[in-house]
């Protein structure tokens, strides 16, 4: 008997224990419970399994006599069978599964009680995929690599398809054929812009202070602590302002987009839009994409200014007058430096919107799928922001800007 297979089915049949005991085909009338016995015997060309005693969890150990065949029994004899619970189905399924797992014919259940026969037929009709996954070891490395490659390819195809649909939606907007409520656009602008100012202010101010503290600790050794203004200004306008704003918007706005759209999908509201003749991309994705693309440059400029003010406050604490700090900042910044972060913010905004909306549109229809879509949206957005920022850094280095 396959003990692992028998144990795996105990939990499945435990819920039927009371009904088994109440409606057992043969109930022993003696006061003392009889030990469970299973006897294999040959009846001509047929293998018969005789079942006797009371089969209960926590009872006596099963006594098996005779030599068990490779497959299942051809017939069962249950004249001496008493009360039973899930222990008996688990014992029988260990042999029945071995006959059917390789595509063999359905085993015979002749001689079993009607309630037990019906439950075994139901269990045998369910594929044993979960059991196989639990008992089998890890698949070979090449199999796992192949599955990972296929999953990556499918994800890439989904991204390209979604970006293409967003491009078509933008084209319909430019040609005046996109249909969405202007109210939705302004609501998204408010959510992505004004309502994001408090958290952007706090993070940007603290980042500017941190840069100033770190820069002053090092530059003071060379007597060049005035260059803290240059460090803070260039770091904020080129990298930190736009990157931190994008990360904030990924966790705040991108996650909200994914949660909102995935909730609509689970409630079948997106299907209702299609039925009513509205394109979900025009109605749901396009306003959010436009709002983030429009507001990210403004938030980035605001973040740069707030970060520089945070560095200026630290500079005043370490002996750099505010006027001198501000003049040095203006001297270190050029139109090229100042525009690099703003240019990147447009691409970051589109990335955040596409990641959030894509995860929402591709989510399942269960409540758990809403949380999964939100998590995936944040992870995907931050990952792509870092990748894009690295690509921009390489391009700006090659262009010597």
Image (cartoon, rainbow, N blue to C red):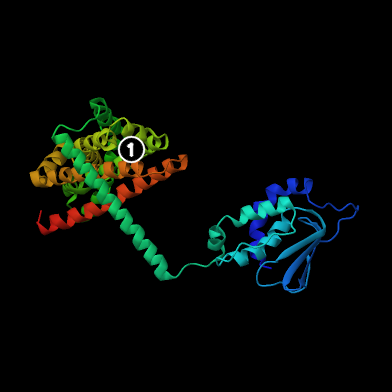
Please determine whether, in this image, residue 76 is positioned above or below residue 364: below
Q: Position of residue 303 (x, y in %)?
A: 23, 38
Q: Quadrant of the N terminus?
A: bottom right
**Residue at numbered disc 1:** 257
Number of marks in picture: 1
Quarter residue 104 falls in: bottom right
Quarter residue 391 falls in: bottom left
The answer to whether residue 258 of the structure is visible from this angle is: yes
* Point 17% across, 52% down: residue: 224
The outermost residue toward the front is 44
Quarter residue 396 falls in: bottom left
The answer to whether residue 319 of the structure is visible from this angle is: no
Left or right of 197? Residue 121 is: right
Left or right of 113? Residue 217 is: left
Q: Position of residue 103 (x, y in %)?
A: 55, 65
Please determine whether, in this image, residue 341 is positioned above or below residue 196: below
Left or right of 338? Residue 281 is: right
Secondary structure category for the residue under label 1: helix
In terms of depth relative to the viewer, which is nearer, 341 or 47? 47
* Point 86% across, 59% down: residue: 34
Left or right of 356? Residue 334 is: left
In terms of depth relative to the viewer, which is nearer, 330 or 72? 72
């Amino acid at each position: 008997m396959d003990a692992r297979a028998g144990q795996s089915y105990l939990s499945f049949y435990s819920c039927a224990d009371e009904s088994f005991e109440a409606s057992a085909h043969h109930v022993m009338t003696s006061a003392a419970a009889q030990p469970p016995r299973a006897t294999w015997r040959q009846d001509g060309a047929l293998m018969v399994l005789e079942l006797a005693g009371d089969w209960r969890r926590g009872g006596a150990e099963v006594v098996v006599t005779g030599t068990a065949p490779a497959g299942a029994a051809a017939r069962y004899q249950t004249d001496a069978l008493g009360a039973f619970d899930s222990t008996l189905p688990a014992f029988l399924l260990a042999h029945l599964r071995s006959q059917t797992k390789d595509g063999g014919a359905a085993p015979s259940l002749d001689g079993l009680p009607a309630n037990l026969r019906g439950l075994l037929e139901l269990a045998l009709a369910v594929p044993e995929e979960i059991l196989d996954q639990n008992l089998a070891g890890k698949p070979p490395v090449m199999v796992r690599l192949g599955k990972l490659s296929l999953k990556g390819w499918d994800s890439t195809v989904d991204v390209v398809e979604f970006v293409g649909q967003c491009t078509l939606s933008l084209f319909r907007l430019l040609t005046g054929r996109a249909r969405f409520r202007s109210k939705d656009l302004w609501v998204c602008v408010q959510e992505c812009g004004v309502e994001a100012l408090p958290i952007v202010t706090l993070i940007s101010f603290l980042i500017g202070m941190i840069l100033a503290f770190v820069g002053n600790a090092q530059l003071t050794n060379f007597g060049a602590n005035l260059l803290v203004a240059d460090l803070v200004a260039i770091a904020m306008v080129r990298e930190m302002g736009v990157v931190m704003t994008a990360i904030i918007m990924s966790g705040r706005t991108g996650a909200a987009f994914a949660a909102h759209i995935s909730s609509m999908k689970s409630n079948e509201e997106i299907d209702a839009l299609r039925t009513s003749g509205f394109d979900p991309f025009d109605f749901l994705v396009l306003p959010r994409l436009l709002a983030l693309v429009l507001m990210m440059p403004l938030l980035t400029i605001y973040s740069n200014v707030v970060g520089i003010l945070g560095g200026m406050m630290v500079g005043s604490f370490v002996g750099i007058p505010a006027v001198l700090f501000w003049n040095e900042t203006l001297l270190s910044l050029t139109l090229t430096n100042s525009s690099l972060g703003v240019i990147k913010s447009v691409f970051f905004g589109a990335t955040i919107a596409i990641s959030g909306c894509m995860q929402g549109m591709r989510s399942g229809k269960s409540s758990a799928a809403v949380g999964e879509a939100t998590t995936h949206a944040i992870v995907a957005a931050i990952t792509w922001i870092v990748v894009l920022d690295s690509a921009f850094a390489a391009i700006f280095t090659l262009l010597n800007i």
